[in-house]
Image (cartoon, rainbow, N blue to C red):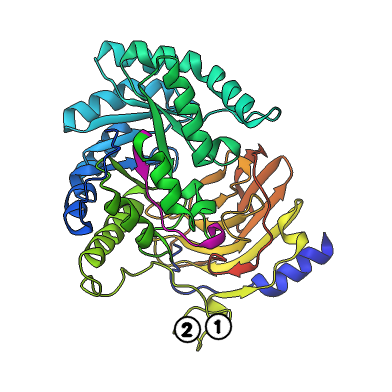
């Protein structure tokens, strides 16, 4: 540890004098709808569904605040994702959506309390569930096993009058042909309400056979959730229009005549959900225009944090110490790790990233930053539960401070000027470590 601390101190004593911002209807018809006409319907604002906006919202909105946000954005449908902490507020969420004219479009994973409330309020949202991943047997046997394990959910959702959507989340059960196979098996048993909700952010393996995959799934699709798409899921979550492939993939969808709902994501814990959704709305509008007439959309929407060049942000070559990338090291990503840096943070209008290791898609990623709006010192570790360590200490006061994080295998502590401001027990969360670089004053990606 003394060697690591010494190496970190040599590179991390950086003065940051300016804020640094990190960034349902089944359809099987091919009616020849042109991209021009289809885009006005399918990609229109009234067809969008907000997804991953509850536990992933950096601002941790209440049900009332979330409903108001959706109204402000002009989104009238929400797919509700949750964690255990949100169960007590299920009913309030339903009431706020009703009050603001928002459709409770879908519900993640199923829950007895939610089912009770759906009956009470005569709601019939789609229920999105991940199918199991059988490990043994022939392909036909695996399909039978997966379908059998979904029968209970199929019966319950059928009783409630809700569609059951098989949700792709990687693995065998996330493959289009297997999703379709499970659907067919369940429908053969009388569960005609079973279909598919497909997520591009869990489908990077099918970028280059997307046309075939989409055609296979289209008769069963309940919803299609969009995402910016680069090869290798680099990064996994990316706002629309910023990737290499999503425009071509969306063109396939429009040319197919698909008329079902379209979901747009937050799913970025470091961002305010309104900011993330706004970026995707803007990016989708650009794609929509470009598909009507190439070049008519103008410049691509700006990215909050452009990629680095030669270890520095563009146009910052005169002050390289403000933001830079360095080679990553095994010692930086495996606890115990002690990080300390000196910084002056002048604004809470955005996220001030001080130190980060690896990209966000790595389970070994960690970052030390100040939270947007509140300006409080925070750490994010996606490979841990909980994935945020939060303090109540505002550090964006324009004064120099020494910030420290002591990251142990089961505990993370934060310090400001030697005073402990947060102490959080953590446990491992499933995920894959992906070795990357080391960032000062910025994220790695």
Magenta-drawn stretch contains 349? no
Q: Is residue 135 above or below residue 122?
A: below
- In the rendered image, the quadrant that contains the C terminus is bottom right
Res 184 → quadrant: top left
Q: Residue at x 21, y 38 (%)?
A: 76
Determine if residue 279 is in view: yes
Tag 1 residue: 320
Q: Position of residue 236 (x, y in %)?
A: 51, 54
Q: Does residue 111 appear in this view? A: no
Q: Nearer the viewer, residue 327 or 319?
A: 327
What's the distance in space between the residues labelled 2 and 1, CA to CA?
Answer: 6 Å
Image coordinates for residue 202, horizontal then vertical, percent: 50, 46
Tags 2 and 1 touching, CB below 8 Å: yes
* 133 w.r.t. 402: above or below: above
Q: Nearer the viewer, residue 223 or 266?
A: 223
Q: Which residue is more in the foreground, 14 or 108?
A: 108
Q: Residue 204, percent across and down?
A: 51, 53
Give the extent of the magenta segment: 220-233
SS under mark 2: loop
Which residue is labeled 2 in the image? 316
Dividing the picture into quadrants, the one containing residue 404 is bottom right
């Amino acid at each position: 540890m003394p060697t690591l601390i010494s190496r970190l101190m040599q590179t991390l004593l950086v003065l940051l004098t300016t804020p640094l911002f990190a960034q349902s209807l089944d359809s099987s018809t091919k009616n020849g709808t042109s991209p021009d006409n289809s885009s006005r319907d399918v990609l229109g604002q009234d067809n969008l569904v907000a997804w991953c906006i509850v536990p992933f919202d950096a601002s941790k909105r209440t049900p009332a605040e979330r409903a108001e946000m959706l109204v402000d954005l002009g989104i009238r449908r929400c797919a509700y994702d949750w964690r255990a902490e949100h169960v007590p507020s299920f009913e309030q969420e339903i009431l706020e959506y009703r009050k603001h004219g928002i459709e409770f479009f879908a519900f993640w994973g199923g829950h007895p309390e939610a089912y009770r409330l759906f009956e009470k309020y005569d709601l019939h949202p789609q229920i999105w569930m991940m199918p199991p991943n059988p490990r043994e047997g022939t392909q036909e046997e695996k399909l039978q096993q997966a379908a059998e394990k979904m029968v209970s959910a199929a019966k319950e959702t059928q009783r409630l009058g809700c569609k059951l959507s098989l949700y792709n989340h990687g693995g065998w059960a996330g493959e289009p042909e297997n999703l379709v196979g499970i659907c067919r098996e369940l429908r053969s048993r009388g569960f005609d309400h079973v279909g598919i909700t497909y997520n591009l952010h869990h489908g990077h393996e099918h970028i280059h056979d997307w046309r075939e995959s989409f055609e296979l799934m289209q008769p069963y699709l309940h919803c299609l959730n969009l995402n910016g798409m680069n090869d290798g899921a680099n990064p996994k979550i990316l706002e629309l229009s910023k990737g290499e492939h999503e425009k071509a993939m969306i063109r396939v969808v429009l040319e197919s005549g698909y008329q079902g709902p379209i979901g747009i994501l937050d799913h970025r814990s470091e961002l305010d959900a309104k900011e993330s959704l706004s970026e995707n709305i803007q990016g989708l509008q650009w794609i929509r225009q470009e598909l009507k007439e190439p070049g008519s959309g103008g410049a691509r929407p700006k990215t909050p944090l452009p990629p680095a060049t030669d270890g520095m942000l563009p146009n910052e070559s005169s002050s390289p110490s403000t933001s830079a990338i360095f080679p990553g090291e095994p010692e930086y990503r495996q606890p115990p790790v002690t990080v300390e840096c000196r910084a002056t943070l002048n604004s809470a209008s955005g996220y001030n990233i001080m130190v980060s290791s690896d990209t966000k898609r790595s389970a070994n990623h960690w970052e030390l930053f100040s939270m947007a709006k509140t300006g409080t010192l925070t750490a994010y570790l996606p490979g841990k539960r909980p994935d945020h360590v939060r303090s109540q200490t505002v550090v964006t006061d324009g004064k120099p401070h020494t910030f420290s994080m002591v990251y142990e295998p089961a505990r993370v502590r934060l310090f400001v000027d030697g005073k402990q401001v947060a102490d959080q027990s953590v446990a491992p969360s499933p995920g894959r470590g992906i070795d990357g670089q080391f960032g000062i004053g910025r994220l790695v990606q």
